[in-house]
Image (cartoon, helix red, strand yellow):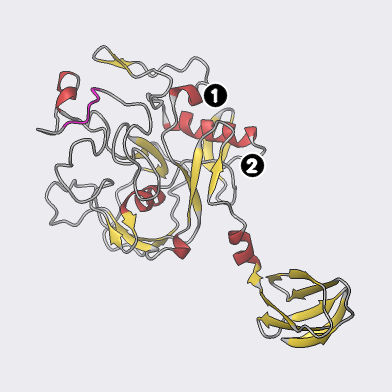
């Protein structure tokens, strides 16, 4: 039987049942029994097809090889579940419309803080991000006696409310604990229980970088959102859990006329997800990110996949909350 084999790249090798038949696309005449056809090239992931030729019936197969890196990415699951039941979504800037953007706020923007300096960042590395904040119930599997406390007589400590009153060290240690639980090499380096740095090559759990957090919350196709929830200020009711009129009895400043139905923190994922299926990026509770806190210098070169300094005295938080 006749089998036409079309290959890409054009200089890939073709073997039949382990026997080399040459390079590039070709037409093979083979016995009418099951045949193993393999196409390979150094630096590419091999592909295999099983075909049974038929006399008088021409068949055609097409095999396009992926580079080793492309094959690795293609095998990555778009969604994974952690040992604690957390859902994490894959975000891969390399296949999105925008992979380079400006963090911070323009000087002319009303309400800009002195530390909100614009800086360019480029995103190349794919990463996973949990779809919701870590709950008290999940964090108590790491620290059984954790207590998120209360605010103005309102509990912050219920099972499905987000875990709060955590130091950056506790948050990073939780990531290492979850990595070990799943047999992954920890991202953070520890010395006597204290985080002293990190291994950027580790595939273990970690806090998102500030750039990753901003990318996941603000980049939507070719557009850069002004806020995590969109462009509107004040936001529409029930957009996010922010300092609304009901929180006035607990916190100082509120958004006049805004209502979200929660005095303090809400159970995670109580509000609609964003365009990436991520909840509470713009509210509920503020979130630690990986970066040591620093104010960027205007005019810095574009940073590619920045993770921040390995050590520092203060770390960065992102996102608003029910009290701000």
Relative image position of residue 230 (x, y in whole percent): 24, 49
Circle 2 crowding by C-alpha within 10 Å: few under 14, some 14–19, many from 20 = some
- Front in this rendered view, residue 8 or 149: 8
Q: Nearer the viewer, mark 1 or mark 2?
A: 1
Residue ranking furthest to the top: 153
Quarter holding the C terminus is top left
- Front in this rendered view, residue 168 or 2: 2
Q: Is residue 196 left or right of residue 265?
A: right
Q: Is residue 189 left or right of residue 26?
A: left
Circle 1 crowding by C-alpha within 10 Å: few under 14, some 14–19, many from 20 = some
Q: Eyeballing the image, is 62 above or below 96? A: below
Residue 224 location, quadrant: bottom left
- Front in this rendered view, residue 272 or 324: 272
Q: Is residue 1 left or right of residue 195?
A: right
Q: Which residue is mark 1?
A: 142
Quarter holding the N terminus is bottom right
Q: Eyeballing the image, is 121 above or below 49? A: above
Do we see residue 314 in this rendering? no
Relative image position of residue 268 (x, y in whole percent): 38, 30
Q: Which residues are magenta?
A: 259-263
Relative image position of residue 19 (x, y in whole percent): 88, 78
Label 2 sits on a secondary structure element that is loop
Q: Which residue is mark 2?
A: 185
- Our reading of the magenta stretch's main secondary structure is loop
Label 1 sits on a secondary structure element that is loop
**138 drawn magenta:** no
Q: Earlier in the sequence, mark 1 or mark 2?
A: 1
Mark 1 in CB contact with mark 2 (< 8 angstroms): no
């Amino acid at each position: 039987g006749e089998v036409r084999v079309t290959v890409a790249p054009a200089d890939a090798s073709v073997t039949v049942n382990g026997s080399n038949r040459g390079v590039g696309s070709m037409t093979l005449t083979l016995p009418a029994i099951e045949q193993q056809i393999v196409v390979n090239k150094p630096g590419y992931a091999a592909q295999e097809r099983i075909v049974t030729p038929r006399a008088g019936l021409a068949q055609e197969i097409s095999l396009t090889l992926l580079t080793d890196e492309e094959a690795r990415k293609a095998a990555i699951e778009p969604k994974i579940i952690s040992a604690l039941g957390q859902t994490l979504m894959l975000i891969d800037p390399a296949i999105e419309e925008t992979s380079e953007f400006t963090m911070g706020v323009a000087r002319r923007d009303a309400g800009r803080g002195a530390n909100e300096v614009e800086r360019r960042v480029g995103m190349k590395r794919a990463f996973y991000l949990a779809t919701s904040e870590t709950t008290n119930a999940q964090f108590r599997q790491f620290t059984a006696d954790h207590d998120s406390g209360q605010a103005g007589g309102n509990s912050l400590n219920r099972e499905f409310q987000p875990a709060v009153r955590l130091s950056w060290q506790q948050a990073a240690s939780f990531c290492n604990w979850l990595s070990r639980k799943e047999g992954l090499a920890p991202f953070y380096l520890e010395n006597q229980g204290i985080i002293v740095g990190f291994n950027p090559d580790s595939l273990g759990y970690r806090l998102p970088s500030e750039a990753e957090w901003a990318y996941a919350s603000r980049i939507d196709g070719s557009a850069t959102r002004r806020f995590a929830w969109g462009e509107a200020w004040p936001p529409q009711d029930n957009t996010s859990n922010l300092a609304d009129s009901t929180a006035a009895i607990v916190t100082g400043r509120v958004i006049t006329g805004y209502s979200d139905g929660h005095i303090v923190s809400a159970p995670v994922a109580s509000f609609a997800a964003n365009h990436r299926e991520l909840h509470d990026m713009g509210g509920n509770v503020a979130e630690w990110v990986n970066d040591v806190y620093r104010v960027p210098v205007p005019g810095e070169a574009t940073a590619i996949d920045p993770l921040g300094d390995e050590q520092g005295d203060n770390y960065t938080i992102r996102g608003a909350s029910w009290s701000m």
